[in-house]
Amino acid sequence: MKRPTIADIARRAGVSKGAVSYALNGQPGVSEATRKRILSIAQEIGFNANSAARALSGARARAVGLTLCRPARILGIEPWFMGLISGFEAELGARSYALTLQVVATPEQEVEVYRRWWGERRIDGVIVTDIREGDVRIPVLQQLQLPAVVIGGPGDTGPIAQIWSDDAGAITEAVRYLVALGHHRIARVSGNADLLHTQNRTKAFEAVCASLGLDHALTIPADYTGEEGSRATRRLLIGGDRPTAIIYDNDVMAVAGLAVAQEMGLSVPGDLSIVAWDDSPLCSLVHPPLTALSRDISAYGAQAARELLAAIDGQVVGNVEAGRVHLTPRGSTAPPR
Amino acid sequence: MKRPTIADIARRAGVSKGAVSYALNGQPGVSEATRKRILSIAQEIGFNANSAARALSGARARAVGLTLCRPARILGIEPWFMGLISGFEAELGARSYALTLQVVATPEQEVEVYRRWWGERRIDGVIVTDIREGDVRIPVLQQLQLPAVVIGGPGDTGPIAQIWSDDAGAITEAVRYLVALGHHRIARVSGNADLLHTQNRTKAFEAVCASLGLDHALTIPADYTGEEGSRATRRLLIGGDRPTAIIYDNDVMAVAGLAVAQEMGLSVPGDLSIVAWDDSPLCSLVHPPLTALSRDISAYGAQAARELLAAIDGQVVGNVEAGRVHLTPRGSTAPPR
DNA sequence: CCACATCACTGAACCGGGTAAGTTGGGGAG
DNA sequence: CTCCCCAACTTACCCGGTTCAGTGATGTGG
């Protein structure tokens, strides 16, 4: 079961390896008749170019890397990354790029993985998520000259391309909606406070609450896990003047918050309205279904992959805003009693 | 920013590249002093071997492939795959193997991806999930002689290694537990009926119910999605002699089932007990938390990766049972009213 | 009829590691 | 003193594509 090479094709077609290479890659230098003959032989014997040999001479690995820096516990349940991944795939698959994955524990390990991958010529570029303020990865990417696209922000990433969505606009819309329903005491349970998009959301949340004259605008920092979501929710609900609405930075914490409200005998949405960021099937799964800030995560991922491939091709890629975030009202929001 | 090669190391150390290669790979043929000198130079200039060059001569790609054949909608929310992936990573990372991922729509596409990857020498082996009866992938893997490990079963996979868990024992335990609580009308909502492990579970469920003299043992086929889980649950609960307990084939459908019960005004566990297969953080997230059949998915994945690496090393790998499944009782099960 | 361009190809040099086979130099045995 | 052996290298070729500098045949214009 020896895997065929271009030399095999060359032998069968009675031409040189060079001619076969030209034919397979659509390069000029062979007649149309010969090209057809070569392609049909390749087809017949099930030829696939050895990616290692191709990478060795052509310098392209035809693969991009993605590191996931969250504990497996939360990775599994949060639909965000899988949505993103399937978005990447749509774009990468079409250009027959592979996606290489690595789960790591810290940003420092991510840096190590980038270095290794790039040194090994295993990948042509990376997709960077969960960007922080003064992220350690940015200078390394610049130093290595490793093509990259940052998801999240907007923030300072120097010359590295960036895809972001309008988090500020989205949270403003959510708060305005709750206020229109009659809520005055609105709280928020945030994701990890060191992430750039969390900071952007927090700033925007405080700004809109101030502009609308709400003085109870409290953000409790959590970490995207259900446990922290429950804890933060309990802290908010046992207080004297408890909020009548809570906005959660992800779907998992929102679901956990809903469970806490039910456990405390509060009715949702009667006693408490809930808004989840990043809509997902999870939000429609629970009872009542959760009002959410929706965006097409898969399209977001596809766009990021497109930008990365452009960067790999040497094009200068700038700062791109992804599709809009919009509010999807469901059963978890209503006027307060 | 030229990436260093062994030739650079050789020049700086004043030896030939052959010597450098021996030194870096721990082969005999260089003195201990020279080896140390070469290693320290490699360290200093941040050398990483070009994986393409290595793969080209050594014939190992040092990567394994995984295809995910489910719609993104369900992939994202089901913790199963991410748990599996982080298990793989633990093992692969330790031996610096990379994991290459591809999301596909059909088993036929999976076959195509396997062929391409193997032809391109992009991977040394694959992990195969969601095995079906008479699965089209098995003969192709055999024909290609592509090292593989099948997750799921037990079933007929010929000479291909297989990791499975005792689904029959687990469902027997769950049914016995429910019967011990006083339940007589127990139903089950299954995953895709064409999957091998679904069939194994269905057979075992029917067998244990028959042996305990339960005549209401009904399995409604669904597809692991929340929507189908809801639909199946509604069908079960609107009937005249509705079940007092339902076992779901995954966590997502169990959560959806819980929401349907709440929406219909039934109390869980008072009017309906719920058992979820594959425990996950999702089960502890909702209210009441769901009784579940737990297994260490990450360890399962790690074991699969170990078996695959052994198969790649040419060892004969057989049929391995993974760690035990056990029942984790939580708030969603109680004696029927 | 010749100079020149163009086409369709060939041959060989790469890419960067791995490794079998050959080459030293030094030490010990006979 | 010679022979042999072995460690410690070097040399050279391999892997399978890509690419560039030829080369011979054919066509074309003056």
Image (cartoon, coloured by chain):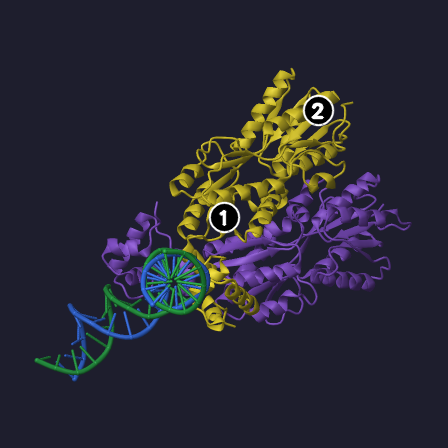
Chain colours: A purple, B yellow, C green, D blue
Question: Where residue B219 sits in the image (x, y, percent)?
Answer: 60, 26
The chain ID associated with circle 2 is: B
Mark 2, residues whose alpha carbon is within 10 Å: few (<14), some, or many (≥20)?
Answer: some
Q: Residue at x 55, y 41 (%)?
A: B304
Q: Is residue A332 visible?
A: no
**Image quadrant in which the C terminus of chain A is located:** top right
Q: Earlier in the sequence, mark 1 or mark 2?
A: 1
Q: Quadrant of residue A332?
A: top right
Q: State whether residue B116 is above or below residue A202.
A: above
Co-location on one chain, circles 1 and 2: yes
User: Residue beneath label 2, please?
Assistant: B177
The residue under label 2 is which amino acid type?
Tyr
- Crowd class of label 1 (few under 14; some 14 to 19; many from 20; radius 10 Å): many
Residue B65: mark in rendering: 1
Report the Cα–Cα distance between label 1 and label 2.
39 Å
Q: Answer yes or no: is residue A21 visible.
A: yes
Question: Residue B16 location, x and y as percent?
Answer: 43, 68
Q: Which mark is residue B334?
A: none
In the foreground, A35 or A320 = A35
Along the line of sight, the residue nearer the viewer: C5 or B84: B84
Q: Label 1 sits on what residue type?
A: Gly
Q: Quadrant of residue B158?
A: top left
Residue C15, percent across and down? 41, 67
SS of the residue at dot 2?
helix
Residue A334, placed above or below residue A143: above
Viewer-proximal residue, B144 or B94?
A: B94
